[in-house]
Each structure stands twice: as C-alpha cells, then as structure tokens.
Amino acid sequence: MGLLDGKVALITGGSRGIGRGIVERFLEEGADVAFTYVSSPDKANALAAELASRTGRRVLAIQSDAAQFDAAQAAVDQVTTAWERLDVLVNNAGITKDQLLMRMSEADWDAVMDTNLKSVFNMTKAVMRTMLKQRSGSIINMSSVVGVKGNAGQANYAASKAGIIGFTKSVALELGSRNIRSNAIAPGFIETEMTGALDPKVVEQWREGIPLKRGGTPTDVANACVYFASDLSTYVTGQTLHVCGGMLT
C-alpha cells in the first residue's frame, strides 16, 4: 500500500529537476501522474513511457505552458477527461532570470512573474471546479527560501516566490470549508542538473553554509510533497514548509 494509492496528481514542470523527482516519488507511492513540460516532446513522452513501464502506474505527459491561462485549463481538462478526477495539483513550474535590479529589464521581470506566479493562479483556477465538485483536493505550491528572506540579484524571483506564499494562504482560507487544502514548500539549495553547471568551489561554499552540510536533493523536496498530497496532512493547510537543511534557522 502506498501513501497515494488511488490518487490522481498533476505536476507542472515535471520532466526534469525537482519536478521529475516529485513525479517519480508520487508514482512510487501509488498515484497516477500527469506532468506538464514546455519543450522537447520526444524526451517527455519517452520519460512518461519509461516511468509507466517501471512503476505500472498511468503516466501522462502534457505539453503546456502554465503561464498561459487557456493552456492551463486545457491541461487540467486533459487529465480529468482521461482519468475523471484530480486529487493533487503541484505548481512546480519556475524559471530564473537573475540580475541586479538596476540592470533588470521589464521583460525579465515579466517572464519570471508569469512563469512562477501567474502560473500558480492559472492552474489553481483551472482545478477548482473539479476539486469543489469532489469536495476534496490538495494544492501544493513551490515557493523558495528566497521568497522568505530575499536575495540580492533575484528581486523578480524573490517577489514571485513571496507572492506564492500569500496566494497559498489566501486559497487555504477560501477553500478550506470544501476540504481543499493549500500549502507551500520553500526549498533551499537543491542540487539538480542546473546546479551541476556551477563552479564546484561555489557549490561547496553553499554546502558549508547549511547546518546539515549538504545540498538538498529533488527527493528531499518530493518527500515533503508526498506528505502534503497524502492523508497524513488532512489537518494541515495554509502552511509553508521549509526544506532547506536549516538554512533559515
């Protein structure tokens, strides 16, 4: 028996990095999983086929840009048409376009806000009707420790991730009476293929500044998502869980 047996989940940005880690953990715990991706359909569909073969669960790859309102609704409709329900939404899609505010362009501000924050609005709006009808659901939004404490050179990213926390709390207050929960996760320094391109000395400096003396893994974040998606957290809503190795302690 898995913690997510019988549940259907949709994860945005699920073809790599943290998103892929969440997809894999949800499948291991018994969920049927759909994930969105923006580009490289051959790779995404091959991943879906490989994961379905390995786990015996249903896996659906959907090419969709969550920053586009109509595309978000179409992605949700594809899941509910195929599987007739949707129990868990993980708003994971995100980008960075780092620059000091003095040099930051309007285009870079807008791109980060649209992908990181507007997508959360788009996807949450899209799943509401289904979850309200079911009178159940768990919405999990990926924030960041940067959204809590800020970071020089990341004003756009920090603002988008801070906005996610406020949005999460508001949704929890609005939908709690219908048994729909809304929580956020704030990862710290998570080591993925993106951080693999950094100077090893820089990575080691990051690790040394973390009380647990290591970077996190996608699985560390995915385990927190499993908690919020499962019945272990049925009395938890409106919260932000820091998965950061103690960075903010």
Image (spheres, rainbow, N blue to C red):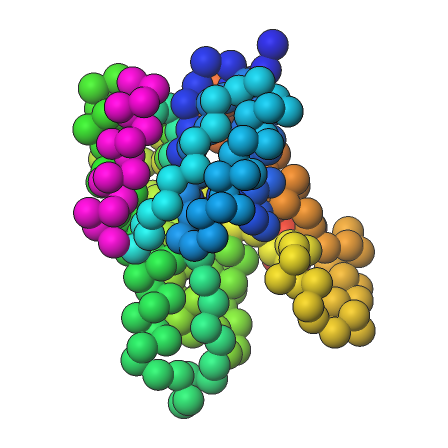
- 224 vs 122, left or right, is right
Q: Is residue 103 magenta?
A: no
The residue lying at 53 percent from left, 46 percent from top is: 43
Can residue 128 be seen in the rendering of this structure? yes
Which residue is at the front of the view, 62 or 158? Answer: 62
Is 17 displayed left or right of 171 in the figure? right
Q: Which percent across, then down, holds residue 129?
A: 19, 28
The foreground one among 143 and 30 is: 30
Determine which quarter of the picture holds residue 209: bottom right
From this view, report whether residue 238 is shown above or below residue 162. above
Residue 241 falls left or right of residue 155: right
- Total marks shown come to 0
Question: Which residue is at 38% across, 66% downward?
Answer: 112
68 and 130: which is toward the camera? 68
Q: From the viewer's side, name the closer residue of 81 and 174.
A: 81
In the rendered image, residue 183, in percent from the top left (x then y), is placed at: 42, 38
Residue 13 appears in the picture as rendered: no
Tell me which residue sits at (74%, 74%) in the image. Answer: 199
| Residue lying farthest to the front in this orientation | 42
Majority secondary structure of magenta residues: helix
**Quadrant of the frame with the C terminus:** bottom right
- Identify the image quadrant of residue 1: top right
Q: Which residues are magenta?
A: 68-85
For residue 224, side relative to residue 106 (left or right): right
* Quadrant housing residue 192: bottom right
- The relative height of residue 239 versus residue 157 in the rendered view (above or below) is above
